[in-house]
Image: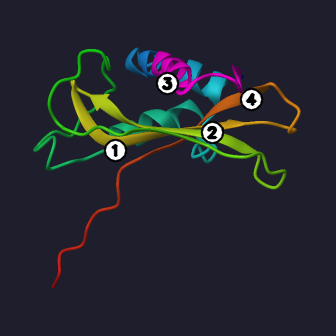
Amino acid sequence: MVNVSLSATDDQLLQIVRSWLDVLAAEDYEKVFESLGYSMAWGAGAQAIRRDIEKYRSPEFYPGVSEFRVSDWRNAVGGNLEPKVLIRRYKYMESLPIVATIELDLPLNGRWSDLEADFIVTVRSPHNTEGVLCLEDICSPPMEMDDA
């Protein structure tokens, strides 16, 4: 479990998440799963993280490429020219205790992709000063359908 201060700035949250991108780049999916969990694992554990990265395809950014791994975000060049980095804050609600989301596109094979990693910060009560960081999803944007 990774605790984060609820008073952390957006830059601090991004720094924490990027440290986990380094773990993904090292392909230590077990460490990521054990520390952050993965909501989309569906019983597959750490292998679900690997699966969702490896099943990514993008004819636009990676034509003909079918093998993917997360790479160092500091050195990623090319690919998606506008990689997403979005942090949202929410007021605590007991029915949905998510107080922050961090969405960012992953660097794959040395280039920016549009494969998005979504992290959430949850709290158990409105009186908490720390939240728990979790890996919620790794997903591609929806495919646009051509007009027929």
Place of residue 96 in the rendered image (x, y in percent of width and height, measured from the top left): 76, 52
Residue marked by disc 2: 100
- The part of the image, by quadrant, that contains residue 114 is top left
**Type of the residue with mark 4:** Gly
Instruction: Tell me, for residue 55, which label it has, or none.
Output: 1
> Marks 3 and 1: in contact by CB < 8 Å?
no
- Find the distance from the CA under tag 2 to the CA under tag 1: 27 Å
> Marks 4 and 2: in contact by CB < 8 Å?
yes
Mark 2 or 1, nearer chain start: 1
Start-end of magenta stretch: 2-20
Q: Which marked residue is nearer to the observer: mark 1 or mark 3?
A: 3
Residue marked by disc 3: 14
In terms of depth relative to the viewer, which is nearer, 6 or 1? Answer: 6
**Type of the residue with mark 1:** Lys
Please identify the quadrant where the C terminus is shown: bottom left
Mark 3 or 4, nearer chain start: 3
Instruction: Tell me, for residue 133, which label it has, or none.
Output: none
In terms of depth relative to the viewer, which is nearer, 134 or 33? Answer: 134
Residue marked by disc 4: 131
Place of residue 125 in the rendered image (x, y in percent of width and height, measured from the top left): 87, 38
Place of residue 108 in the rendered image (x, y in percent of width and height, measured from the top left): 27, 29
Residue drawn at 44 percent across, 33 percent down: 50
SS at mark 1 in the image: loop
- Find the distance from the CA under tag 3 to the CA under tag 2: 11 Å
